[in-house]
Amino acid sequence: MQNIFKSVVVVILTPLTFAACNPNNPSGGLYANLPADSAGTIIKECIEKSGGLDAWQKKNALSLTKLSQSFDSAGNLKRETVQEQYFQYHPTFKARISWTYQDTNYICIYDGDHAKRYVNRMNVNTEKDMQSAWNTIFGAEYVLCMPYKLADAGAKYEYEGEKEVFNKKVYAIKVSYPKDNKEDTYPWTYFFDVQTKELEGYSNPSNGDQTDVTHYDAFTTIDGIKLPMQRTGYVCDKDRRPLYKSSFYRNSNFKFYDAPSDTIFTAPVNK
């Protein structure tokens, strides 16, 4: 489950942040949040090859089905869930994620103001449940919307040079989200193919002699926008060499909407 939980640590982020003034890139424009250096250039080129930030920001809403699996070190399946996900970006960000696990139904809804969690269609409104709903929604949205999210405001970028990961030469860029005057909060390292500039994967901070590394296995293009379709997570040694597969994700049934029904983001009726 390592990559499942590591993927939600970015919940402090606003779901969709447009260009703001970046003193390291005073020229402004769509990519004003990116620095005018190697890191910014690589990320921008990756986004442009994925459809471009302008085209992405014009999309109003997106739905999909997400399969998630986690494995133990022996390769045994520990958990499997299938989620239905809905994200509205304009005019207000809203989201709904629902799934069933062990005969229990879960729904997380963000209505534009609050994140709420429902278990068997009943609202569970403890502080822990509301935080869980927030983490689920914004963590899922962050990972799904790569590489476009890398152009959001609030990040600090550090170009780490060329590395070899997944038996490929990649550019490594450390992306962190400072909070409470801490400069290295929630750091991720993203990998971009040296030849194509496409997003190859990412790693989380090392935990002792191990680190979690996720590889993007496949993308799909919907209405001119490239989105992650399949990725695999590995527990690796400190040099990012895989020790065993820890997680697998597959997204399907992508659909962009102009105006999704508002009932999607309202509280479920307890039948």
Image: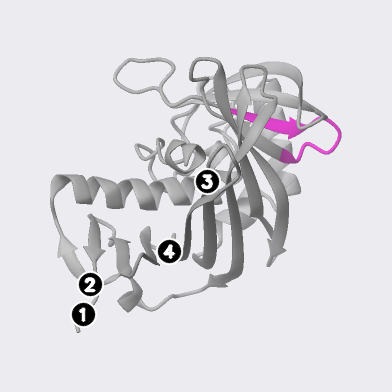
Q: CA distance from mark 3 to mark 1?
A: 30 Å
Instruction: Give amino acid for label 3.
Output: Val
Location of residue 29 by image quarter: top right
199 left or right of 233?
Answer: right
Q: Looking at the image, is mark 3 or mark 2 earlier in the sequence?
A: 2
Residue at the (82%, 30%) spot, across then down? 168
Circle 1 Cα neighbour tier, 10 Å, few/some/many (<14 / 14–19 / ≥20) = few
In the displayed structure, 223 sits above or below 271; it is above
Q: 10 Å neighbourhood of mark 2: few (<14), some, or many (≥20)?
A: some
Residue position marked by numbered label 4 in the rendering: 88
Depth order, front residue of 21/97: 97
Q: For marks 4 and 3, give the CA distance.
A: 16 Å
Between marks 4 and 1, how big is the CA–CA gap?
21 Å
Which residues are the magenta region? 189-199
Task: Name the amino acid, label 2.
Answer: Arg
Q: Which residue is mark 1?
A: 269
Q: 62 left or right of 54?
A: left
* Residue for badge 2: 121
